[in-house]
Amino acid sequence: MTGLIVPPGQGRKLITPAQEVTFKATAADGSAVSIFEVVVPPGFDVGAHVHDHSQEFFYVLEGELDLLAFEPTERTGDTWHDWKSSEGDHVVHAGEGACMFVPPGTPHAFRNATDRPARMLFQSYPSPDHEHYFEDIAEIWASGRVDPEAVERMRQRYDVRQITPLRYEPPARPGPARHGARHDGR
């Protein structure tokens, strides 16, 4: 089989604690656009960032994501969650079927603020830049210790200027109920 038809659940997978990425169409297939299916776990926030040359497209297949694609009136360094533009744009809580197109030079971000995984189709142009980005980030995550300097060097190689930090803070799982346990921590 040539790889031009990819059955459900198939494709090369890169799995890290923060994301599961399945390659659907790549430069090796002759595509000018890299296409991925991405599972975004609860608590994952890619952080606001911008690409000078790349353009991207995101389509929510399942679940819910907070989406940002505009220049804010003020770029705060810690979080993008409350950004607003001078035209009245704001972060959108998006469900299945929502999409986001990101032209070059546009600050953008996504996060899963729910307690359930979300799944999206993600396209990036030009190919294979984001293919290599995902491979390199998976290697950094696999090391067991995320080195911020290594991440920054990698971002520079792939046209990513980070504005707010990438975060992965999975929701706390409730522990087993204990007889007589107090809810206030004492």
Image (spheres, helix red, strand yellow):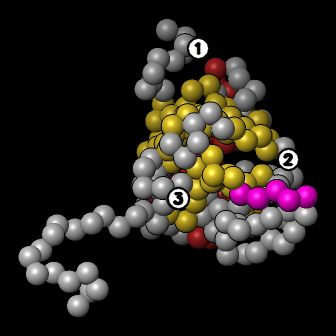
Three-letter amino acid code at the position of disc 3: Ala
Judging by the rendered image, the residue that carries numbered circle 3 is 113
Residue 104 is labelled as 2
Judging by the rendered image, the residue that carries numbered circle 1 is 4
Category of crowding for the residue at label 1, using alpha-carbon neighbours closer than 10 angstroms: few (below 14), some (14–19), many (at least 20): few
- Give the foreground label among 2 and 3: 3
Q: Are marks 2 and 3 in contact (CB under 8 Å)?
A: no
Three-letter amino acid code at the position of disc 1: Leu
In the picture, measured across the screen, residue 137 lies left or right of residue 186, that is right
Residues at marks 2 and 1, CA–CA distance in whole angstroms:
28 Å
Secondary element under disc 2, as helix, strand or loop, is loop
Three-letter amino acid code at the position of disc 2: Pro
- Give the foreground label among 3 and 1: 3
Q: Position of residue 149 (x, y in %)?
A: 62, 70
In this picture, which residue range is highlighted in magenta?
87-91
Up-down: is 137 above or below 165? Answer: above
